[in-house]
Amino acid sequence: MMCTPAEPFMLAPGQSASCTASHTLTQVDLDAGTYSNVATASGVSPNNTPVTDASDDPDDLTNADPNNDGNPDDPTVTPLPEAPSLSVLKSRTILPI
């Protein structure tokens, strides 16, 4: 994972950070037909209280709130549709006898 600013970092109220991560799809992901992703941020508030929040998929209108904190935390689910194909190329070369 890469973050700007680089981690570990401290943010003042109102500041933000941006992080990017990648995942190489596996055969298990492809067999499942979807890949589910949740980003979680943790820190300490200005009054020294631990805080944690999970990302929300803005395209998921169910707005699941598993921790009942009033903020939806549903995962981002990316469909991996099957697109099987097979291509065969056949050629021949005739050699003189």
Image: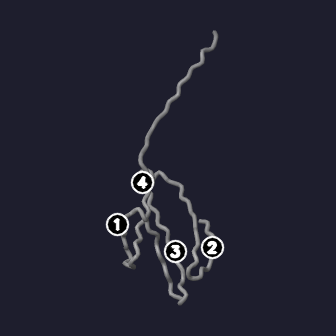
Q: How crowded is mark 2: few (under 14 residues within 10 Å), some or many (20 or more)?
A: few
Of helix, strand and loop, which one carries label 4? strand
Q: Residues within 10 Å of mark 1 (few under 14, many from 20)?
A: few
Look at mark 2 in the image and give the residue it sits on: 7
Q: Residue at x 52, y 74 (%)?
A: 41
Asked if 79 appears above or below 64 in the picture, the reply is: above
Where residue 70 sits in the image (x, y, percent)? 38, 78
Of helix, strand and loop, which one carries label 2? loop
Look at mark 4 in the image and give the residue it sits on: 79
Where residue 34 sits in the image (x, y, percent)? 42, 55
Tell me how far mark 4 sits from mark 1, CA to CA. Answer: 17 Å
Q: Residue at x 54, y 55 (%)?
A: 24
Q: Which residue is drawn at 61% across and 69% down?
A: 3
Q: Which residue lies furthest to the bottom in this view?
A: 47
Look at mark 3 in the image and give the residue it sits on: 41
Disc 2 marks a residue whose amino acid type is Glu
Look at mark 1 in the image and give the residue it sits on: 62
Where residue 80 sits in the image (x, y, percent)? 43, 51
Tell me how far mark 1 sits from mark 3, CA to CA. Answer: 22 Å
Of helix, strand and loop, which one carries label 1? loop
Q: Residue at x 64, y 11 (%)?
A: 96
Query: Quick one: 96 or 78, which is closer to the camera?
Result: 78
Q: Which of marks 1 and 2 is in front?
A: 1
Mark closest to the chain's N terminus, 3 or 4? 3
Mark closest to the chain's N terminus, 2 or 3? 2
The quadrant of the rendering that contains the C terminus is top right
Tell me how far mark 1 sits from mark 2, CA to CA. Answer: 33 Å
Disc 1 marks a residue whose amino acid type is Thr
Residues at circles 3 and 4 in contact by the CB criterion of under 8 Å: no
Tell me how far mark 2 sits from mark 3, CA to CA. Answer: 12 Å
Tell me how far mark 4 sits from mark 2, CA to CA. Answer: 31 Å
Residues at circles 1 and 2 in contact by the CB criterion of under 8 Å: no
